[in-house]
Image (cartoon, rainbow, N blue to C red):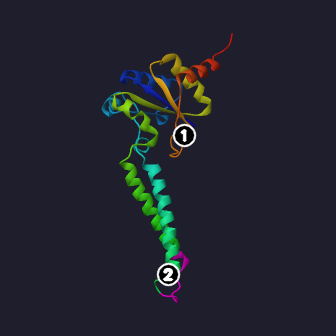
Amino acid sequence: MKCIYFLSPTLKCTQEVSDDLHAVGVNDFYLHVISKDECGLKKQHIHSANYLETLDVIRDGFIGAALGFIVGLIGVSLLMYFKPFGPTVEVPTLVYAILVGAATLFGAWEGGLTGIATENKKLRRFHDDIAAGKYLILVYVRKHQEETVRKMMQERHADAELVAVDSHFINPFTGVDRVSQSTTQNTVQSTAPRM
């Protein structure tokens, strides 16, 4: 599944794009719009993005969990080396596993809290456009739908610019490929029937 990013200039255009995407088989679960005008999206019944898409909770949570795991391993190693309870006290392995697990969970929690305060890394390049009042449309498509969606958008919504494609939005560590306008035109021309 891919995530295709379109940048729409107005709410009216976004509503038309949403309606046409529904007509080609993309339901609300796979269509999310990011805008500073949340009220306008609600009034037009356009499915807005959720916090997992707009904030860096998942990415920072994973990073925090990894750091917590490493800190937990270092802490357990130090406990095993220095034996603070005495050389004769045998600490069960389960206690060490619980300590590493607790450090990992604490790191994930701290990372998630950091992520709540951070804009999603994949959306940073569109921050100025969204702040200027444009609408970023995220369309999740399966392989068999991708060409249909791209062709429909090129033919019916030239004002909604194809700006990027992601292999999948949910993976927080993948990059977003920016799409040039010539690439978009070549893709649509290659799918057009030849006479």
Instruction: Identify the secondary structure beneath mark 2.
Output: helix
Give x and y (percent) for residue 83.
50, 83
Q: Magenta part mainly helix, strand or loop? A: loop
Which three-letter amino acid code belongs to the residue tagged 1? His
Q: Residue furthest right?
A: 195
The magenta stretch is 86-95
Mark closest to the chain's N terminus, 1 or 2: 2
Viewer-proximal residue among 162 and 37: 162
* Residue 191: mark in rendering: none
Viewer-proximal residue among 178 and 167: 178
Label 1 vs label 2, nearer the camera: 2
Give x and y (percent) for residue 139.
50, 32
Which quarter of the rendered picture does the N terminus lie within? top right
Give x and y (percent) for residue 155.
52, 16
Give x and y (percent) for residue 22.
49, 26
> Does the CB distance between marks 1 and 2 fall below 8 Å?
no
Which quarter of the rendered picture does the C terminus lie within? top right
Q: Residue furthest bottom?
A: 88
Residue identified by numbered label 2: 82
> In the figure, 7 relative to 1: above or below?
above
Q: Residue furthest top?
A: 195
Magenta stretch encompasses residue 191: no
> In the figure, 151 relative to 114: above or below?
above
- Residue displayed at 35% across by 30% down: 41
Residue identified by numbered label 1: 168
- Residue displayed at 33% across by 33% down: 36
Place residue 45 in its image quadrant: top left
Q: Is residue 94 left or right of residue 124?
A: right
Which three-letter amino acid code belongs to the residue tagged 2? Phe
